[in-house]
Every structure is written in C-alpha cells, then in structure tokens.
Image: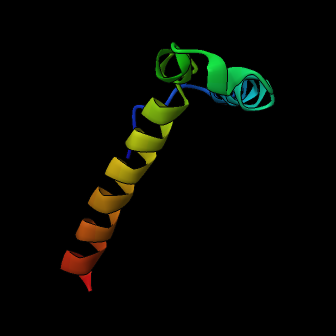
C-alpha cells in the first residue's frame, strides 16, 4: 500500500527543520511560531502516517 509519504530525504529534511526550530531559544518570542512549525512539513508527515496506520489497522481487522 502506497502511503503518499515523501522519500526519506524529504522526511529527514523536515525533521532537521523541526529540530532547528525547537532548538531556537528565542522561538517563544516569535509570533510566527506556528507558521514556522507548519513550514517544516513535520505535521503533514505525521498526519499521513497516522491516517494510513488507521487504514492498515482497519484492513487487518477485516482479515482476522
């Protein structure tokens, strides 16, 4: 089942952007924090993983 998740390089880049954002000590002062978080793409990757995990579990329930 293809889960529409980008390749490992895109996921790794997204994670590195997230870590960079989280390691910024002054981030709590930035009013654009949520926008910057969204721009990392990390939330989208997690959404896709959870979405397809649910579909996979649902398909397993039918088979067993």
33 lies left or right of 10? left
Q: Is residue 1 above or below residue 21?
A: below
Q: Is residue 63 above or below residue 35?
A: below
Residue, far left: 62
Residue, far front: 29
Q: Is residue 61 above or below residue 55?
A: below
46 lies left or right of 23? left
Residue 59 in view here: yes
Residue 10 in view here: no
User: For the point 55% across and 20% down, which residue is it?
Assistant: 33
User: For the point 58% across and 20% down, which residue is it?
Assistant: 40
Choose top left, top right, bottom left or bottom right for residue 11: top right
Choose top left, top right, bottom left or bottom right for residue 22: top right
Q: How is the image coloured?
A: rainbow
- Where is residue 17? Give x, y as percent: 70, 21
Residue, far bottom: 64
28 lies left or right of 42? right
- Where is residue 62? Give x, y as percent: 18, 77
Placement of the C terminus among the 4 image quadrants: bottom left
- Where is residue 9? Give x, y as percent: 70, 23
């Amino acid at each position: 089942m293809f889960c529409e998740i980008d390749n490992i390089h895109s996921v790794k880049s997204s994670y590195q952007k997230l870590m960079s954002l989280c390691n910024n000590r002054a981030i709590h002062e930035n009013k654009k924090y949520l926008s910057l978080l969204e721009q990392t793409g990390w939330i989208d990757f997690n959404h896709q993983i959870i979405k397809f995990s649910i579909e996979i579990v649902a398909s397993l329930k039918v088979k067993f």
